[in-house]
Image (cartoon, rainbow, N blue to C red):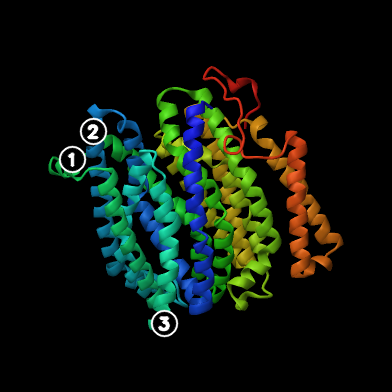
């Protein structure tokens, strides 16, 4: 990794880390909503959010990535300014137009479809959705603007907006509306109010970092950019399927007659597990513009090195967090709501491979997209989405919550395998085993030790103190094993230590790759 690339990536990751700390309000929101509104309202809310996120992905995902790629490609070249704003006008115009159409469809077709799919709480879900879709145009504008600033290698706005303001504001408005309207309507209004505030912030960000005049000019002389559309439409569909893949278990539990309360219980556990994906996003958001630049420059050796090094950073941090959730899962759900005390949380253990696989391998997916191969990602999501639906149809009636978790984990495993192979194929980007194996080995050894403690000293780990002691011992063991494997105190390379950067002529071909 060249020294300049390493320094810029380090700064971007640091900013995103601060943003991720702000996302701690997300679990706080989970606790507040569940304790104030009740588990059934929370179950309806997360079902509605799953629909909104899928709709937002359909509207903006490809255009968002297109905006990031366009700005990263053209911002450094003064003679390409017109091209940059032409592409921005396309991304904004199409995403805002589709947002209005989709919101209209919810009001027209929703009353027939939603109650049909959800017998037990379809009417309440529809009412919440009809409020929340009003925020879709604001969300679309916000996503495009933040992506454009990331293309400029400015990561602070994503950290401030999505990492801090959004979860904190939703937490505050959710608590505030409860005093006035303690129902799903109150929670929906809190959601819309939050997105309206963030829309104002997005207007400020655009005015500060980009220019309105060339954008208006681009709209007045609007020209359809076919290359962008060839990239964006498949990526929109891909991310829509990706969102369904992420939330299909929550969506399909209700379709199989599972109550809102039980759906809320599963959704709370799934949300805790999936918060761990924020660790990967700290680095992937900072890494995305560098993929574009390195690929465009043909620096494949450095691309492989940065891909592997960044993956190492992610998984080194992720494994302790995975261990913590695995050991303390019952206590975390009891903190969310006393209603969940004593319920079986095996499904959370079966969901933990999802963030593990994502943190270990999903940067490959970023490489596939950022090098312009959105159709491959669409193929991946189609394959795994269909597989996930079929597995849910088979496993939920038989195994319930455990079946939903197993279906999601199996589908994610297939997707990760496809992405790693494709990153090597389309960009010659290889994940170097010699760079990344140590935290995996240390984590595996600790998991064996924790499992043994659970088997042989189950009574001791049956208390909160016992589980806390077991976790502390496991984390200490993980650190010691890493010291032994690395021959030094474990650290995040390039952030807390200095390592000799390879030259651009370094060829990782002689190293093992996955």
CA gap, disc 2 to disc 3?
50 Å
Q: Mark 2 or 1 closer to N-term?
A: 2
- Residue indicated by mark 3: 179
Q: Does any portion of residue 47 appear in the rendered image? A: yes
Q: Badge 1: few (under 14), some or many (20 or more) residues near its Cα, within 10 Å?
A: some
Find residue 217 and report its image quarter.
top left
Q: Secondary structure at mark 3?
A: helix
Which label belongs to residue 81?
Answer: 2
Q: Answer whether labels 3 and 1 touch (C-beta < 8 Å).
A: no
Q: Are marks 2 and 1 in contact (CB under 8 Å)?
A: yes
Residue at 50% in and 63% down:
25
Rendered position, 426 above or below 85: above
Q: Is residue 183 above or below residue 27?
A: below
**446 up-or-down from 172: above or below:** above
**Residue 383 in view, yes or no:** no
- Counting residues from the N terminus, which is met first, the one under dot 2 or under dot 3? 2
Q: Position of residue 365 (x, y in %)?
A: 49, 40
> Which one is earlier in the sequence, the residue at label 3 or at label 1?
3
Residue 482: which quarter of the image? top right
Which element is circle 1 on?
helix
**Where the N terminus falls, by quadrant?**
top right
Please report the residue visible at 49 percent of the width from the left and 73 percent of the height from the top.
Answer: 33
Q: Residues within 10 Å of mark 3 (few under 14, many from 20)?
A: few
- The image's mark for residue 214 is 1
Relative placement, left or right, of 187 versus 267 is left
Distance from the alpha carbon under mark 2 to that under mark 1 = 8 Å
Q: For mark 2, give the secondary structure.
A: helix
x and y, in percent, of residue 448 in the image = 79, 50
Pointer 2 with pointer 3, Cβ within 8 A: no
Quadrant that contains the C terminus: top right
């Amino acid at each position: 990794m060249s020294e300049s690339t390493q320094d810029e990536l380090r700064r971007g990751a640091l900013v995103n880390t601060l943003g991720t700390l702000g996302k701690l309000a997300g679990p706080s929101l989970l606790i507040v909503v569940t304790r104030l509104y009740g588990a059934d309202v929370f179950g309806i809310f997360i079902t509605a959010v799953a629909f909104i996120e899928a709709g937002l992905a359909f509207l903006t995902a490809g255009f968002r990535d297109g905006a990031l790629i366009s700005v990263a490609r053209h911002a450094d070249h003064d003679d390409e300014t017109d091209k940059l704003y032409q592409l921005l006008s396309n991304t904004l115009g199409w995403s805002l137009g589709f947002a209005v159409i989709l919101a209209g469809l919810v009001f027209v077709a929703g009353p027939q479809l939603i109650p049909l799919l959800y017998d037990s709480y379809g009417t309440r879900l529809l009412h919440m959705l009809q409020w929340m879709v009003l925020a879709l145009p604001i969300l679309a504008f916000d996503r495009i603007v933040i992506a454009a600033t990331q293309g400029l290698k400015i990561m602070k706005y994503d950290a401030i907006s999505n990492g801090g303001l959004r979860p904190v504001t939703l937490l505050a408005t959710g608590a505030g509306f409860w005093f006035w309207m303690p129902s799903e309507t109150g929670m929906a209004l809190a959601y819309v109010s939050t997105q309206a505030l963030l829309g104002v912030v997005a207007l400020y960000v655009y005015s500060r970092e980009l220019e309105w005049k060339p954008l208006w000019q681009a709209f007045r002389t609007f020209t359809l950019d076919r290359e962008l559309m060839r990239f964006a439409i498949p990526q929109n569909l891909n991310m829509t399927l990706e969102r369904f893949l992420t939330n299909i278990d929550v969506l399909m539990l209700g379709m199989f007659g599972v109550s809102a309360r039980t759906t809320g219980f599963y959704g709370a556990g799934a949300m805790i597990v999936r918060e761990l994906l924020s660790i990967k996003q700290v680095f992937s958001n900072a890494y995305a513009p560098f993929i574009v630049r390195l690929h465009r420059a043909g620096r494949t050796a450095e691309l492989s090195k940065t891909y592997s090094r960044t993956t190492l950073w992610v998984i080194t941090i992720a494994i302790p967090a995975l261990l913590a959730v695995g050991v303390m899962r019952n206590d975390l759900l009891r903190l969310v709501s006393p209603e969940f005390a004593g319920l079986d949380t095996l499904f959370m253990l079966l969901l933990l491979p999802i963030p593990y696989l994502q943190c270990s391998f999903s940067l490959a997916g970023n490489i596939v997209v950022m090098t312009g191969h959105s159709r491959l990602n669409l193929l991946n999501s189609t394959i795994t989405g269909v597989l996930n639906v079929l597995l849910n149809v088979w496993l939920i009636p038989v195994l319930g919550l455990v079946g939903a978790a197993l279906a999601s984990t199996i589908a994610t495993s297939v997707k990760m395998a496809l992405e790693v192979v494709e990153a090597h194929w389309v960009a010659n980007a290889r994940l170097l085993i010699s760079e990344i194996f140590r935290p995996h080995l240390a984590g595996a050894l600790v998991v064996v030790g924790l499992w043994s403690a659970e088997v042989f000293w189950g009574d001791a780990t049956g208390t909160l103190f016992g589980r806390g002691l077991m976790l502390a011992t496991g984390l200490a063991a993980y650190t010691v094993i890493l010291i032994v494997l690395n021959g030094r105190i474990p650290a995040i390379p390039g952030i807390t230590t200095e390592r000799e950067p390879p030259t651009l002529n370094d060829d990782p071909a002689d190293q093992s790759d996955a």
